[in-house]
Image (cartoon, coloured by chain):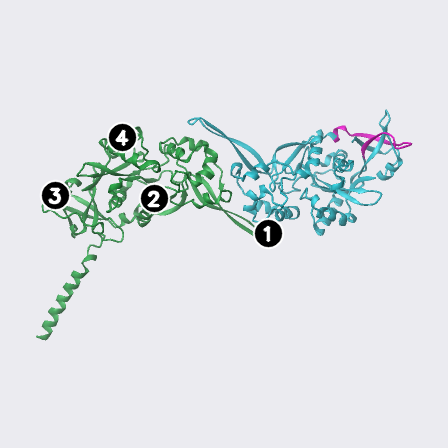
Amino acid sequence: MWQVRPANPDDLQQILDIAGSQSARLSSTLPNTETALAEKIAQSQSDLASQSKDNRPRRLLFVLENTDTGQIAGTAGIDTRAGNGQPFYNYRRDYLIHASHQLNVSRRVEVLYPSHALTDLTLLCAFTLRPELRETPAFELLSRARILFIASHRDWFSNRIVSEIQGVQHNDGSVPFWDSLGRHFFNMDFETADRHSGQLSKTFIAELMPPNPVYVTLLSEPAQAALGEPHPLTQPNYSLLQREGFQTGCYLDIFDGGPVLEARTDSLKTLVTSQQKTLHGSEGPDGETCLISAGEGAGFRCLLTPVAETLADDVKVPVSTWRALNCNAGDPVRISPL
Amino acid sequence: MLVIRPLQETDLDDLYGMAEKAGKGLTTLPADRGLLQRKIERTRESFNQRCAPEAGLYLFALEDTVTARVVGISGIEARVGLEEVFYNYRLSVTVNASRELGVHVRTPTLHLSNDMTDTTEICSLLLAGDYQGGGNGLLLSRCRFMFLDEFRKHFSEKVFAEMRGVSDPQGRSPLWDALGSKFFDMEFVQADTLSGLGNKSFIAELMPKYPIYLPMLPDVARAVIGMVHDNTRPALKMLQAEGFNFNGLVDIFDGGPLVEAFVSNIRTVRESINRHAMVINKPIDLDVPPEHRVMICNRSFRDFRVTTLPIDCIGPDVVRIPHDVAEALLVESGDPVRLAPLKEGALSPMHPLRGQADEDEKILDRLRNYRSRHAQD
């Protein structure tokens, strides 16, 4: 049975394996060195343990675990405050009209403005999954479990939520947007910058990023074509987030020009359709498969289960699900249809 | 004889003919009758002091007194950027550095600027092809510095010149193709012509206002920033010899450099001297090589005149001027005149004895002989 739970230090080695694999290059917010990853797990644990309702930035990391084998097959993270107390960098893609009455010319000029506007919004990040699971319900479980977590800890999160989607990268590893813009200023290749971004404080971005707006027309043609385009590998994740209610706005990743998806937290489909129920036992594995979550903070669990609903605010689920959720009859759970 | 004088209404045909022959390169003098007519009118108002000093446009004509035709023109714009907006790019550097990563990157950047606003520009130099050489170009260009020097209160302390940037024989500019064309939707020649015709507001409306980072431009475009067109190289050399230097600004269209100098530091100004005219009836051979000639001007604002004279005419107090030259300069005996070197590295009126070193040696020799004879006695 697949289950999503908060990461703990024992998962370190298995997460490292995933982070090191090529297919996991979907987010730079998952560090791929042991020290940095251990730190991230430790921070997630301490952030989950603190039950206070303050707005301080929390960085949470969840794992997808096969409860039968103990194998870790994916990770998913939430930063409650993008930037984690530091500026969060994006480009805002905007337009100016350059018009001359005298010449009867009007021209739309596209400009990329450095922006911190998304700082302090909730950020979905660090999503990785073993490639063989991409087409399975486990994929949906891993991604949407985070939104059930948000639903049960709503105070921790902001009203708007964003997610960065990886942009275009060619098979030889080159990133057209980076090569046309960032490379000139950071004086390093994309991999290096990306690694620094995952590990170092963001100060280096402030120090090295071009301080003024950039005219899109001066970018190379491949770079212009890559603006706001998701990497083909991210397509399943991209579609899933769109179904959740995320939309592309005008923000782009500063490194690869990939799109930033935005949504109102309270309009997320999983959050709207999920319901708080009381747990009861059922005889057999009958009913519709749903996501079910329970527990607070470090005790949070989310898995897929057949649900037999009764008319009252009760749900009947198999006893194996109870065990996985660490719950007893009468405990509150949250369910959402798959 | 070639004489510099203020441009007149009657010069329109000659001027139009010259502008037509010059073709596309000369944006300040397009072959447009109406525009040239207006320029002449402005020039007349300026020399007659019927307009505000800062609105002045002083165009000088080089007239061949034999044919009574205008064969060259040069000008001074008293102040730029007062009515329209005067744009340049400033070539500067953006540094991004991170101590943490040991990265220190210098990015050359073009910033749009109006820094030359309210500054005097020397402009519109054009000399007919069959008159080029023999120091005529020098006279046409340098006469302006004599005027600037004489009437400094009409001009700014600093003067500048825009040098034509690189373009190919078809009139294509690499910088325009990489930058301007992305915003203007027109050919370089067309934009340049519009700009020369005085329709400058379109520049403000269509121009990119944010800094341009040069690494984002192709190499061919970057290579021409601050470079002059091959045809303009002699003019640049001449101005450099006068003390003009690149001031870090370039043309927004073709990337040609701006050179500037303080009037008081211009060589022609520093090396000029005052004398009184002594009109003589004895003819003088005026046909000497430019190395042996100096510029001479009268001191009149309205009827400013400049021509050249052999350097031998300069005396300690007066300068001997043949009758016909005096007539062309509108001076009479006793009038103050000003003299300045024509060609760099040649004789200067400030050191008129330099060429007479042999004479001095002869005098010393005579002295030595005299002494030795007396010693024998």
Q: Amino acid at mark 2?
A: Asn
Chain of the residue on which disc 1 is drawn: B
Tell me the CA gap for discs 3 and 2: 38 Å
| Residue most extreme to the top | A311
Please name the residue that numbered disc 3 is placed on.
Answer: B323
Residue B230, picture quadrant: top left
The percent position of residue B307, horizontal first and vertical second, equals: 20, 43
The percent position of residue B18, horizontal first and vertical second, equals: 27, 36
Chain of the residue on which disc 3 is drawn: B
Please name the residue that numbered disc 4 is placed on.
Answer: B41
Please name the residue that numbered disc 2 is placed on.
Answer: B231
Chain of the residue on which disc 2 is drawn: B
Asked if both marks, 2 and 1, belong to the same chain, the answer given is yes
- Disc 1 element: loop
Q: Is residue B330 left or right of residue A214?
A: left
Residue at coordinates 17% horizontally, 61% vertically from top-left?
B358
Q: Earlier in the sequence, mark 4 or mark 3?
A: 4
Please name the residue that numbered disc 1 is placed on.
Answer: B101
Q: Amino acid at mark 3?
A: His
Comparing B158 with B196, the one in front is B196
The percent position of residue A124, horizontal first and vertical second, equals: 70, 38
Q: Is residue A81 left or right of residue B93?
A: right
Tell me the CA gap for discs 2 and 4: 30 Å
- Callout 4–callout 3 Cβ contact below 8 Å: no
Q: Residues within 10 Å of mark 4 (few under 14, many from 20)?
A: some
Q: Earlier in the sequence, mark 1 or mark 4?
A: 4
Residue B56 visible, this angle: no
Tell me the CA gap for discs 1 and 4: 63 Å
Report which colour depicts chain B: green
The magenta region covers: A270-292
**Total numbered badges shown on the rendered structure:** 4
- Tell which chain the image draws in cyan: A
